[in-house]
Image (cartoon, rainbow, N blue to C red):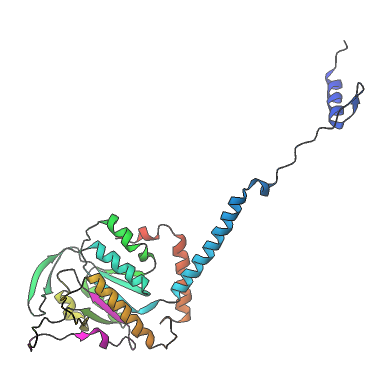
Amino acid sequence: AAQVKPADRSIQLLSITMGHCISGVFLAPYALPAAPSRQAEIPVEELIDDADSEQHNLRRLARLEDAASHRVSGVRIVLENLTNEGNRAAILRSVEALGLLNVDEIRSCEATETYAGPDNESTKSATATSQMRCRRGDSRSIVNGAEKWVNIARYATVKDFIRSMKDKNVRVLAAMPPPLEQPGACSPRAKVHQPLDSIDFSSQEVALVFGCEGKGISREMQVLCDGTFSVPMHGLTESLNVSVTVAICAHFARSRRLEHFGAAARTDMDVDAQEKLKADYRRRSTDNNFVKKIKM
């Protein structure tokens, strides 16, 4: 048999690929497989999921912008040395849900404060530890991410907070329990606090201060604030949980604040402030570590 030289073999292979007839047998040309369609490789389910995801993102963006356009910045909620993380979480959730924007926290590490007693006359001295009882597992489900959509400012002392509010021209009112009186009795010594429904929320921004559970507003805050107020109570219950009180005050204050801006008002912020907040919300929505940056 004749040997096939390398050069002849190359010609033979080339002839095969070209579809030439060799030794009376016609060989079909060798066709390279077509490049698969990229779209054909993507399952229909994935295409549907992508479309749904895009629609979801558009709806989420619309919700964020709508929430920003309903925020009220002229009513501030202030928490002075709260000791229960669950209460704090519930307050943040209520404040966000009711459309308020600003929360201020005063957290002294270890400070001996004088607090008002329940009868608004006697006082008692106690060491207040404002470090939160870090039951984060319990509180995370309560707050439900609300801290991501409110602006939280923190102060180390009451004086620092008061100084900041003075610079912003914000009126500071501290929440106090109503005087406890027997039916038909008149106590001229009992201090009368301004009822919540008589506060003017329209002419000036207002900060409502809520004190530590059990001890209430510190004596220092009472001395330095612009006034005190209480939530009118007409039943037999003598006190409310601080988170419940905040929710009542936040809802009432928002309504009264917006009345000043007209029946159709949704916010007390101007257009520039709204657009800035919308942009900030869009940034926060894509920052998965935003909440972690807020020290609990």
Front-most of residues 176 and 296: 176
- The N terminus: image quadrant: top right
Residue 271, magenta (yes or no): no
Q: Position of residue 154 (x, y in %)?
A: 29, 68
What is the magenta range?
185-210
Residue depicted at 45% across the width and 68% down the height: 281
Q: Position of residue 124 (x, y in %)?
A: 8, 72
Magenta: main secondary structure equals loop
Q: Is residue 173 above or below residue 134?
A: below
Q: Is residue 131 above or below residue 273?
A: above
For residue 148, side relative to residue 215 (left or right): right
Residue depicted at 67% across the width and 49% down the height: 39
Residue 137 in sight: yes
Residue depicted at 81% across the width and 32% down the height: 30
Q: Is residue 183 above or below residue 78?
A: below
Residue 164 in sight: no
Q: Give the quarter of the image for residue 183.
A: bottom left
Front-most of residues 73 and 7: 73
For residue 292, side relative to residue 35 (left or right): left
Front-most of residues 288 and 260: 260
